[in-house]
C-alpha cells in the first residue's frame, strides 16, 4: 500500500486534552490522524473518511477523494482546517512562493481578456 503526497495539504487544528496542529499531506497520514487523534470517533462523515482512506490505500478510490472525505469529517467535527493553495510536496520556501503567487492572483483577479499589443 503506497500513497503519494496530495497536491494540496490539509492543516487541521485538533483541540482536546492537548492542542494538535496536524499538516496532512497524504492518505496514510489522514488515516493515522483519524484513528489516533480525532476527537469524536463517530458520525457519518468520520466513518466515510475512514472508509475512503482505506479504499484509497487499496487503490479503489483516488487520494483526492480521501482528502475531500477528511475535510468533510473535519467540518462535521467542527474542527478548524485549511487546505493549502499549492502542492503539498513543496518545501517551505517553494510553498511560501506559491502562496504569494496565489495571493497575488486572488487579490488582483483574473483579467477578462489577455492584453493585446497595439
Image: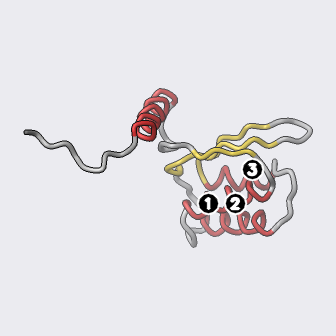
- Label 3, on which residue? 33
Q: Residue at 7% of width from left, 39% of height from top?
A: 118
Tell me how the rendering is colored: secondary structure
Q: Residue at 45% of width from left, 31% of height from top?
A: 100
Does the residue at mark 1 contact the one at mark 2 (Cβ under 8 Å)? Answer: yes
- Disc 1 crowd rating (10 Å Cα; few below 14, some 14-19, many 20+) is some
Q: Earlier in the sequence, mark 3 or mark 1?
A: 3
Gap in angstroms between the C-alphas marked 1 and 2: 6 Å
Name the foreground residue: 101 vs 50.
101
| Label disc, if present, on residue 41 of the rendered structure | none
Q: Earlier in the sequence, mark 3 or mark 2?
A: 3
Does the residue at mark 3 contact the one at mark 1 (Cβ under 8 Å)? Answer: no
| Label disc, if present, on residue 68 of the rendered structure | 1
Q: Residue at 57% of width from left, 72% of height from top?
A: 60
Residue placed furthest toward the left:
118
Instruction: For marks 3 and 2, give the one nearer the viewer.
Output: 2
- Label 2, on which residue? 72
Q: Secondary structure at mark 1?
A: helix
Instruction: Tell me: 27 left or right of 110.
Output: right
Instruction: Tell me: 84 left or right of 24.
Output: left
Amino acid at each position: 500500500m503506497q500513497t503519494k503526497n496530495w497536491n494540496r495539504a490539509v492543516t487541521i487544528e485538533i483541540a482536546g486534552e492537548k492542542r494538535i496542529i496536524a499538516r496532512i499531506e497524504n492518505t496514510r497520514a489522514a488515516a493515522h490522524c483519524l484513528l489516533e487523534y480525532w476527537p469524536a470517533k463517530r458520525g457519518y462523515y468520520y466513518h466515510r473518511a475512514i472508509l475512503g482512506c482505506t479504499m484509497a490505500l487499496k487503490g479503489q478510490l483516488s487520494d483526492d477523494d480521501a482528502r475531500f472525505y477528511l475535510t468533510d469529517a473535519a467540518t462535521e467535527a467542527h474542527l478548524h482546517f485549511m487546505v493549502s493553495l499549492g502542492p503539498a510536496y513543496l518545501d517551505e520556501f517553494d510553498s511560501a512562493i506559491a502562496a504569494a503567487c496565489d495571493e497575488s492572483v486572488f487579490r488582483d483577479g483574473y483579467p477578462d481578456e489577455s492584453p493585446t499589443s497595439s
